[in-house]
C-alpha cells in the first residue's frame, strides 16, 4: 500500500503540478513528443558510415525541431545494428514492439536490412531505408511499411559494365563477399558483363571478416585479369586493395556503392586508392540541388566525422519521415499510408518518388574515380581528360 | 600450376602462425593437463601491446628497427605477465578441480580480455591499422611473387619455434618443466620449485602467443579485438591433430591446417568461401582415424 500511495502521489505531482508550473509558458513548449528511430552500424568496421548517417539524421531532426511551425517535437532514438543480421533483428524487434516509436530510418548493410524487413511488416512499423541497396529489400515482398530512398544495386552494375566496356576492358575477375549483398552484386555484375560480351575469368566469394586473402589472390594473379571487380563493403575492399598490392597485382580495381566514401580512401591509403573506379547512385553532395545547404548546416552543427556517401540519404529519409508525420499525424498506420503516396517530393538529392514497392525510382547513377585521395566524378577527372590513365588499359 | 611456390609460401606463413598458437596449447597441456582456451585472446593482447609500442616509439621519433624490436618485446612481456597471472591466480589454486571447470574458466578469461580490449582500447571496436615496419616489395621467381616481409616473418617464426624447443630440451628450466610434466610429486621431492616452474611455463607458452600476434599484425597490416577467437579454435585443433602434448605434433598440425585451407582455394577457387568447412571436415576425419593425434604424446595413457 505504501508504494501505491507513493506512485499515486508521483502521478498526481506530474499531472497537476507540472502543468501548473509550465502552463503559463508559450504554447510552443507544449508540443507533443514524437519518437522516431535511426538504425545503423555505430560500432565495428563499418561505423564511419553509420556515424555519418546518424549525424545526418540527427541534423534533420534538429532542423525540424528548430522550426516553430512544426506540430510535434521529435526525438531520435538511435540504435546500433553493428551491420550484423542477428543484432539487427534484436534492435528492430525492440523498436517495433515499442509503441511510442512511430517510424524508423534503418540500415546501412543490405544483409541486415533483408533480415529485418519482415519484422517491420509484422509489427506494422513504417520505415524508410537510408542506405542498403539490395534489390530484394523492397522487391522480394510487397510490404506497405517498407520504403527506400537509396537506389538499388542493379543500376550501378548496369552502368559499371557499360563503362568498363567503353574503356576497352575484356577480362574480369569477380571478388565479392559471401553475404546476400555480395551475392547479389556478383549476380548482376556477371549478368551485365556477359551481356556486353566480356569475359569473367573467375569468381571468388569470401566471408566479409576473412583476413587472409593470399590464397585467393595467388589464384587471381595466375588468372591475370585486366580488372578486379569488387562487390562488397569498405573493410574487405580496403583489405583486398592492400593485399593486392602486396602480391604485386596491377589490375584495375573496380568497386561499387559499398566502398563509396572517405573511409575506403583512409583505410587503403590515397596512393593505393588512386584510380579506383566506382558507381554510386547519386551525384556528389556539392552537385545536389540542396547540397550546399546540407554541407553548411552539417558543418555548423559541429560534427567532426564526415557524413560519408549516404549521409545525405539519411538526412532526406529522416526529413521525409518527419514531414509525413506532420501531415498524417503520429500514427503508424497513417504514416504507412501517407508514405505510399510519396511522389515528386523535393529533397536535397532531387525529387523522391516511390513506386508500388516503396522504392525510390529517381536516383542518378554516377561514375566516380579516386584522384589525389578524393572521389571525383569521372567526367570532371583528369582520367576522362586523358591526363591520367586507368591501369591495364588495352 | 606455376603458382605452387606461391601457394606454398602463403601456406607456410599461415602455418607458422597456427603452429605458434598450437605450440602454446600443447605446452600448457603437456605440463599441467590444462586446456587454456584464453590463449587466442592472449595473442590479441600481445598484438595490441605491439601496436601501442610502435605508436609510442614512432612518436618519440625512433628509427624503424627500434619500433620493430619494441613491438616484439612489448608484446612478449605483456603476454608473459598475463599468462603467469592466469596461472598464478586461476590455474594453480584450482589445479585439482575437474578439467571441464578449468576449460570453462579459461574461456571466460578469454572473453574478459577480448571485451576489455573492445571497451577500453581507444576506438577498440574498429579494426586497427598496424604500421608496416618491414621492407615492402619482393621478387618474382617464375610466376610466384615472394614478399620480403613474409619471408622475414616465416624465418622469425620458425626460429622462435626452434628457441622454444631449445629451452624445453636443453636448459635447466626446461628440464624442471619436463620433470613436473612427468610427475609432480616426484619432481617436488627432487627439489624442483613447483610454485615457480608452473607460472614460468605459462609465461613461456603465452609469450609465444605475443610473438605470433605481432607477426600477424606485421603481415596483415590490420588487427582487431576478435582476431584471437578463430585463431584459438584453429590452433587448438592443430594441437589436437598433431597430438596434444607433443610440440612437433603441434607444429605439424598448424602447417597441415594451413595447407588444407590453401589447397581448397588453389584446387577449387569458386569454393573459397567454404575453405574452413573443408579444412575442419578433413580434420574431423583425421581425428576419428587417429584419436590421439598424428604424433601422440609419450605415455599418452594420461589422456
Image (cartoon, helix red, strand yellow):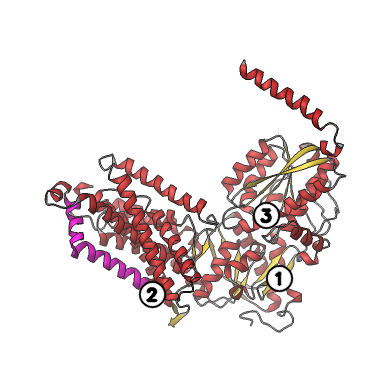
Tag 2 near tag 3, CB within 8 Å: no
Q: Determine if residue A80 is in view.
A: yes
Q: Which residues are magenta?
A: B154-182
- Kindly give the residue lying farthest to the bottom in the view shown: A387
**Neighbour tally class for label 3: few under 14, some 14-19, many 20 plus, Cα within 10 Å:** many
Mark 1 on the same chain as mark 2: no
Chain that bears disc 1: A
Snapshot quadrant of residue B243: bottom left
- Kindly give the residue lying farthest to the top in the view shown: A1
Spatial separation of the CA atoms under disc 3 and disc 1: 19 Å
Q: Quadrant of the N terminus of chain A?
A: top right
Q: Which residue is mark 3?
A: A132
Residue B45 position, x and y percent, is: 42, 57
Out of A312 and A10, give the one closest to the viewer: A10
Spatial separation of the CA atoms under disc 2 and disc 3: 42 Å
Chain that bears disc 3: A
Out of B300 and A202, give the one closest to the viewer: B300
Instruction: Judge whether A242 appears above or below A281 on screen.
Output: below
Instruction: Judge whether A211 appears above or below A121 on screen.
Output: below
Q: A132 left or right of A295?
A: left
Chain that bears disc 2: B
Prevalent SS, magenta region:
helix
Residue A193 position, x and y percent, is: 65, 69
Instruction: Judge whether B196 appears above or below A165 on screen.
Output: above
Q: Which residue is mark 2?
A: B152
Q: Which residue is mark 1?
A: A368
Mark 3 on the same chain as mark 1: yes
Out of B270 and A38, give the one closest to the viewer: A38
Spatial separation of the CA atoms under disc 1 and disc 2: 39 Å
Residue B169 magenta: yes
Q: Determine if residue B257 is in view.
A: no
Amino acid at each position: 500500500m505504501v508504494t501505491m500511495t507513493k506512485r499515486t502521489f508521483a502521478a498526481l505531482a506530474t499531472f497537476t503540478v507540472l502543468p501548473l508550473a509550465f502552463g503559463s509558458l508559450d504554447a510552443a513548449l507544449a508540443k507533443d513528443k514524437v519518437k522516431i528511430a535511426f538504425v545503423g552500424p555505430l560500432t565495428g568496421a563499418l561505423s564511419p558510415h553509420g556515424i555519418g548517417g546518424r549525424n545526418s539524421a540527427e541534423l534533420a531532426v534538429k532542423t525540424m525541431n528548430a522550426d516553430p511551425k512544426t506540430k510535434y517535437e521529435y526525438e531520435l532514438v538511435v540504435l546500433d545494428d553493428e551491420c550484423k543480421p542477428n543484432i539487427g533483428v534484436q534492435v528492430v524487434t525492440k523498436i517495433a514492439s515499442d509503441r511510442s516509436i512511430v517510424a524508423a530510418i534503418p540500415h546501412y548493410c543490405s544483409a541486415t536490412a533483408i533480415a529485418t524487413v519482415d519484422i517491420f511488416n509484422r509489427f506494422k512499423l513504417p520505415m524508410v531505408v537510408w542506405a542498403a541497396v539490395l534489390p530484394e529489400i523492397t522487391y522480394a515482398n510487397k510490404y506497405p511499411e517498407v520504403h527506400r530512398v537509396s537506389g538499388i544495386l542493379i543500376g550501378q552494375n548496369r552502368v559499371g559494365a557499360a563503362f568498363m566496356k567503353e574503356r576497352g576492358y575484356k577480362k574480369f575477375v569477380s571478388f565479392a563477399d559471401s553475404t546476400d549483398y555480395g551475392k547479389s552484386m556478383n549476380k548482376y555484375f556477371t549478368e551485365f558483363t556477359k551481356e556486353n560480351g566480356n569475359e569473367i575469368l573467375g569468381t571468388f566469394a569470401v566471408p566479409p571478416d576473412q583476413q587472409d586473402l593470399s590464397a585467393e589472390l595467388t589464384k587471381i594473379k595466375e588468372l591475370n585479369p585486366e580488372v578486379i571487380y569488387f562487390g562488397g563493403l569498405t573493410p574487405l575492399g580496403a583489405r583486398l586493395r592492400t593485399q593486392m598490392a602486396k602480391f604485386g597485382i596491377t589490375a584495375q580495381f573496380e568497386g561499387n556503392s559499398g566502398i563509396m566514401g572517405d573511409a575506403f580512401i583512409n583505410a587503403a591509403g590515397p596512393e593505393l586508392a588512386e584510380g579506383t573506379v566506382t558507381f554510386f547512385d547519386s551525384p556528389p553532395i556539392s552537385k545536389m540541388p540542396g547540397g550546399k545547404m546540407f554541407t553548411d548546416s552539417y558543418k555548423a552543427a559541429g560534427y567532426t566525422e564526415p557524413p560519408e556517401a549516404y549521409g545525405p540519404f539519411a538526412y532526406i529519409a529522416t526529413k521525409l519521415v518527419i514531414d509525413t508525420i506532420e501531415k498524417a499525424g503520429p500514427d503508424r498506420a497513417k504514416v504507412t499510408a501517407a508514405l505510399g503516396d510519396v511522389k515528386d517530393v523535393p529533397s536535397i538529392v532531387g525529387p523522391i518518388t516511390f513506386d508500388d514497392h516503396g522504392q525510390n525510382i529517381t536516383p542518378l547513377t554516377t561514375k566516380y574515380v579516386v584522384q589525389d585521395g578524393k572521389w571525383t566524378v569521372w567526367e570532371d577527372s583528369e582520367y576522362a581528360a586523358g591526363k591520367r590513365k586507368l591501369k591495364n588499359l588495352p | 600450376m606455376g603458382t605452387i611456390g606461391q601457394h606454398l609460401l602463403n601456406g607456410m606463413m599461415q602455418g607458422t602462425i597456427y603452429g605458434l598458437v598450437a605450440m602454446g596449447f600443447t605446452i600448457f597441456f603437456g605440463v599441467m593437463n590444462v586446456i587454456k582456451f584464453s590463449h587466442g585472446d592472449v595473442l590479441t593482447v600481445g598484438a595490441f601491446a605491439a601496436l601501442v609500442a610502435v605508436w609510442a616509439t614512432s612518436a618519440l621519433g625512433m628509427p624503424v628497427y627500434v619500433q620493430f624490436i619494441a613491438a616484439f618485446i612489448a608484446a612478449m612481456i605483456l603476454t608473459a605477465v598475463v599468462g603467469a597471472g592466469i596461472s598464478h591466480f586461476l590455474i594453480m589454486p584450482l589445479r585439482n578441480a575437474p578439467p571441464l571447470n578449468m576449460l570453462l574458466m579459461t574461456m571466460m578469461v578469454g572473453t574478459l580480455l577480448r571485451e576489455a580490449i573492445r571497451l577500453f582500447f581507444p576506438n577498440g571496436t574498429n579494426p586497427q591499422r598496424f604500421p608496416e615496419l618491414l621492407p615492402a616489395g619482393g621478387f618474382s621467381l617464375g610466376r610466384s611473387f615472394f614478399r620480403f616481409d613474409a619471408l622475414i616473418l616465416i624465418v622469425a617464426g620458425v626460429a622462435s619455434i626452434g628457441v622454444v624447443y631449445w629451452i624445453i630440451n636443453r636448459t635447466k628450466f626446461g628440464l624442471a618443466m619436463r620433470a613436473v610434466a612427468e610427475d609432480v610429486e616426484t619432481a617436488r621431492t627432487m627439489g624442483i620449485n613447483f610454485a615457480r616452474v608452473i607460472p614460468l611455463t605459462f609465461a613461456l607458452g603465452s609469450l609465444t602467443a605475443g610473438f605470433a600476434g605481432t607477426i600477424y599484425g606485421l603481415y596483415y597490416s590490420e588487427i582487431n579485438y576478435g582476431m584471437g577467437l578463430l585463431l584459438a579454435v584453429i590452433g587448438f585443433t592443430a594441437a589436437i591433430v598433431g597430438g596434444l602434448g607433443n610440440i612437433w605434433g603441434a607444429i605439424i598440425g598448424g602447417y597441415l591446417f594451413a595447407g588444407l585451407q590453401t589447397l581448397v582455394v588453389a584446387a577449387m577457387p569458386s569454393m573459397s568461401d567454404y575453405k574452413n568447412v573443408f579444412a575442419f571436415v578433413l580434420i574431423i576425419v583425421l581425428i576419428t582415424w587417429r584419436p590421439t593425434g598424428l604424433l601422440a604424446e609419450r605415455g599418452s595413457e594420461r589422456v
